[in-house]
Image (cartoon, grey):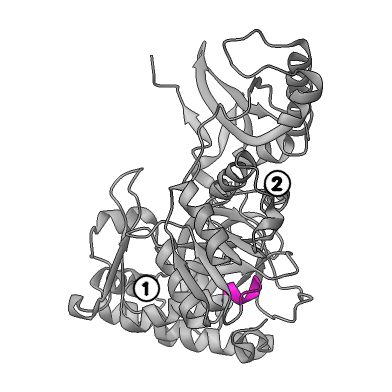
């Protein structure tokens, strides 16, 4: 389904002309509305009248999360505060939270791009949309909510947590589309199984999952556990929130809403632009945002772009699934490793459950990685029945499986890591973003 076909199917030359027109507006708006942006843009000699083509984008300076923190809380806003009708913020787990603002027009834009994303995943007027993203300063819940209402969905604003109540409402209200993090989708699937509820007893058809990196293996586990089609969605509060891009029903890359967000891929180290198809850091420039324009914002997310035609008929660029964040990359004995690479290997082993954590320690001045992953109940039932606690001796079959997992991880990543298998339901479950890496290097 298309929500706005005239834009979603716009020929590339027309789209790029619109992007250039809006880029000039956005640069002018940022320059005239904010002294920090004005100084940077004028120092770079990249004022709106000097932007002759989209290639001139690279003349503009980057913006980073550090800039938002330096000018905390509202020092990069480009409109008077009396025009700001909504405030959101990041969690601030790595420093000061990043505060973002929205004018009424910004909220309308956000609703529009989210409606498109939901339609890409199969939502239509009347779809029962179950929103299990958190509401509040986090942008996930309200982003889905507004887009669903604009599309004409019947929105259930559940927020995150209280898993038993989530399942009750899904059953009784006939939820058809689910929105939450992929890790919480797995938590819901596990709770269904524990209650003896078959996915076929629900009316779920599709789900849009984001806010953390996830793999094809995780998609398969979610689709099997919940009986739906799982779609990836991407966004970040500094740019708009969820709705920057999402998969269509082809599940072949995430369509970027390019009439509002201009994407680039750059080398994370040098900042130099990379060619189409190359993997690097995603940089986004907002083209219509009023309250907090994003001029070449370095997202820190690693992906690749393609402009190849999609079978769905949309003409926008597509981004590959996020591989990880630049600052989440682990360096183990000189080898670069993203947590998603470990997940990809683990989830291809049917004897393992899709619940894991990576423990990072320092031993004898070297970083060591331990992978803790749960054993699938189907494997235990046939190979090691009765093993339900870490306090019990580890059965030989489980020890053998751990060795196979260790060897497969070494073969496919080039990193030696310890593998500890855990009984079912022994690792913590997530109600929001999963904590995949636990850094113990500075503890004791």
Mark identifier at residue 268: none
* Image-quadrant location for residue 234: bottom right
Image position of 326 with respect to 103: above or below? above
x and y percent of residue 248 in the render?
68, 71
Q: Indicate left or right for 287 with 87 as reference.
A: right
x and y percent of residue 283 in the render?
52, 63
Number of disc labels: 2
What's the magenta region? 117-123
Mark identifier at residue 221: 2
Marked residue nearer the N-terminal end (2 or 1): 2
The CA span between labels 2 and 1 is: 38 Å
Q: Does residue 119 show up magenta in the picture? A: yes
Q: Indicate left or right for 404 with 163 as reference.
A: right
Q: How crowded is mark 2: few (under 14 residues within 10 Å), some or many (20 or more)?
A: many
| Viewer can see residue 260 | no
Residue at left 35%, top 43%? Answer: 93
Image position of 403 with respect to 152: above or below? above
Image position of 160 with respect to 248: above or below? above
Most foreground residue, 283 or 127: 127
- The residue that mark 1 highlights is 293
x and y percent of residue 241 in the render?
44, 65
Q: Give SS at disc 2.
A: helix
Nearest-to-viewer mark from 2 and 1: 2
Most foreground residue, 266 or 302: 302
x and y percent of residue 306 in the render?
70, 68
Most foreground residue, 276 or 245: 245
């Amino acid at each position: 389904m298309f929500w706005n076909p005239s834009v979603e199917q716009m020929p590339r030359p027309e789209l790029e002309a619109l992007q250039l027109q809006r880029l000039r507006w956005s640069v002018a708006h940022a320059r005239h509305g904010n002294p920090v942006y004005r100084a940077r843009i004028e120092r770079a000699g990249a004022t709106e009248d000097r932007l002759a083509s989209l290639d001139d984008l690279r003349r503009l300076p980057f913006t980073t999360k550090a800039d938002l923190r330096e000018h905390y809380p509202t020092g990069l806003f480009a409109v008077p505060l009396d025009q700001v009708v909504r405030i959101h913020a990041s969690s601030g787990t790595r420093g000061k939270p990043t505060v973002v603002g929205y004018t009424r027009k910004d909220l309308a834009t956000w609703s529009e791009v989210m409606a498109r994303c939901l339609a890409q995943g199969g939502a239509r007027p009347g779809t029962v949309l179950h929103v299990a993203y958190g509401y509040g300063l986090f942008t996930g819940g309200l982003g889905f909510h507004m887009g669903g209402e604009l599309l004409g969905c019947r929105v259930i604003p559940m927020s995150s947590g209280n898993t038993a109540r989530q399942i009750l409402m899904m059953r009784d209200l006939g939820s058809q589309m689910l929105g939450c993090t992929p890790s919480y989708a797995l938590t819901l699937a596990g709770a269904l199984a524990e209650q003896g509820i078959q996915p076929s007893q629900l009316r779920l058809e599709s789900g849009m999952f984001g806010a953390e990196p996830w793999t094809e293996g995780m998609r398969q586990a979610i689709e099997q556990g919940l009986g739906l089609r799982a779609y990836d969605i991407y966004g970040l509060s500094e740019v708009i929130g969820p709705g920057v891009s999402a998969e269509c029903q082809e599940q072949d890359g995430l369509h970027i809403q390019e009439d509002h967000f201009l994407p680039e891929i750059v080398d994370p180290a040098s900042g130099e632009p990379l060619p189409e198809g190359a993997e690097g850091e995603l940089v986004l420039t907002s083209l219509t945002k009023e309250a907090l324009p994003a001029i070449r914002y370095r997202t820190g997310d690693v992906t690749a772009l393609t402009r190849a035609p999609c079978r769905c008929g949309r003409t926008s660029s597509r981004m590959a699934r996020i591989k990880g964040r630049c600052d989440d990359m682990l360096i183990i004995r000189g080898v670069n490793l993203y947590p998603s690479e470990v997940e990809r290997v683990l989830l291809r082993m049917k004897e393992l459950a899709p619940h894991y954590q990576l423990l990072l320690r320092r031993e004898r001045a070297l970083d060591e990685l331990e992978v803790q992953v749960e054993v699938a109940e189907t494997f235990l039932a046939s190979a090691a029945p009765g093993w339900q606690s870490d306090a019990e001796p580890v059965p030989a079959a489980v020890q053998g499986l751990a060795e196979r997992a260790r060897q497969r991880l070494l073969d496919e990543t080039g990193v030696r890591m310890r593998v500890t298998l855990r009984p079912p339901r022994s690792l913590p479950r997530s109600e929001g973003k999963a904590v995949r890496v636990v850094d113990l290097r500075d503890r004791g």
